[in-house]
Image: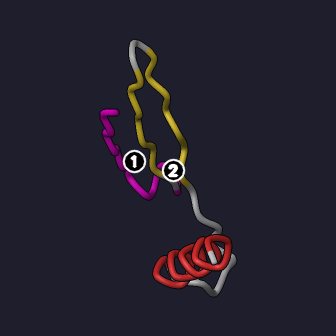
Amino acid sequence: MKETTTTIEKDKVDCSYSEYRIGLTTYRVKISFSSDTDESLEDIINRLIAREVARSA
């Protein structure tokens, strides 16, 4: 699987896109975060890791 990440200028759009190519199909995934949250990106990643560890246990 080939992954390409493209970040759009912040003043235009508050998100970024990742493109994933699987076979002959390219999927473009929009990634955005709420600006109303107090969580940092590190907090979000730590929460997701903790959730995954809890599922595996």
* Drawn side of residue 33 relative to residue 1, left or right: right
Q: What amino acid is labelled 1 in the image?
A: Ile
Query: Quadrant location of the N terminus?
Result: top left
Residue 12 magenta? yes
* Drawn side of residue 23 relative to residue 54, left or right: left
- Cα distance in 3D space between marks 2 and 1: 6 Å
Q: Which residues are magenta?
A: 1-14
Q: Secondary structure at mark 1?
A: loop
Residue for badge 1: 8
Furthest residue toward front: 57
On screen, 26 above or below 9? above
Do residues under tags 2 and 1 come within 8 Å of each other at their CB atoms? yes
Q: Position of residue 22 (x, y in %)?
A: 41, 24
On screen, 16 above or below 33? above
- Mark closer to the chain start, 2 or 1: 1
Q: Residues within 10 Å of mark 1 (few under 14, many from 20)?
A: few
* Drawn side of residue 52 relative to residue 18, left or right: right
Foreground of the two, 55 or 3: 55
Quarter-wise, where is residue 10 in the image? bottom left
Q: Secondary structure at mark 2?
A: loop
Foreground of the two, 56 or 4: 56
Residue for badge 2: 13
Foreground of the two, 25 or 50: 50
On screen, 19 above or below 8? above
Q: Residue at x 63, y 78 (%)?
A: 57
Q: What amino acid is labelled 2 in the image?
A: Val
Residue 49 magenta? no
Q: Residues within 10 Å of mark 2 (few under 14, many from 20)?
A: few
On screen, 10 above or below 51? above
Q: Position of residue 15 (x, y in %)?
A: 51, 53
Q: Position of residue 50 (x, y in %)?
A: 59, 81
